Amino acid sequence: MTAATCAHLDTVAEVTPSSQGCEDCLRIGGRWLHLRLCMSCGHVGCCDNSPNRHATAHFHSQGHPIIQSYEPGEDWWYCYLDDLAFTVDGAPSFAHP
Ligand SMILES: [Zn+2]
Ligand SMILES: [Zn+2]
Ligand SMILES: [Zn+2]
């Protein structure tokens, strides 16, 4: 594995987080562990350690490959297509309240 860069950064937009919690869990009364922010549309979904894995479900349904952690103090990004975690210098860091 030598792939060190993500080729999908052109899918990243100026997003506004859609919610302070997983919007899909809030709709169905579910619970989540950690939150992930879609960098294409601002969808907030829950992580793969959460029962409903809405961030991954959002990738599969919408095809938006890049998320950023929405946890306070975390600014890593992740690309589903590359299965790659990375950081972006100078990018805005998002965190739920
Ligand atoms: Zn990528
Ligand atoms: Zn969820
Ligand atoms: Zn999205």
Image (cartoon, helix red, strand yellow):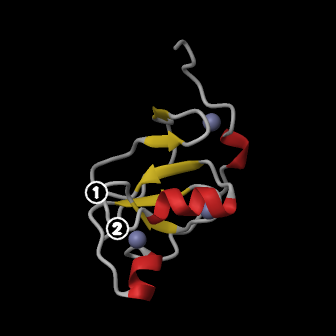
Dot 2 and dot 1 residues touching (CB under 8 Å): yes
Q: Quadrant of residue 80?
A: top right
**Residue at the spot x=28%, y=57% of the render?**
72
What amino acid is found at the position of numbered circle 2 in the picture? Answer: His
Quarter in which the C terminus is drawn: bottom left
At horizontal 39% and vertical 84% (from top left) the residue drawn is 26
Upstream in sequence: badge 2 or badge 1:
1
| Residue 61 position by quadrant | bottom right
**Residue placed most toward the observer, 39 or 46:** 46
Residue 11: % across, % down: 71, 48
Residue 85 vertical position relative to residue 49 in the rendered view, above or below: above
Q: Residues within 10 Å of mark 1 (few under 14, many from 20)?
A: few
Query: Number of callouts in the render?
Result: 2
Q: Which residue corresponds to mark 1?
A: 72
Q: Amino acid at mark 1?
A: Pro
Q: Position of residue 24 (x, y in %)?
A: 47, 78
Nearest the eye: 17 or 28: 28
Vertical position of residue 24 compared to residue 78: above or below: below
* Residue that mark 2 sits on: 96
As helix, strand or loop, the secondary structure at mark 2 comes to loop
Q: Is residue 11 left or right of residue 51?
A: right
Say which quarter of the image contains residue 28. Answer: bottom left
Residue nearest the viewer, comparing 72 with 54:
54
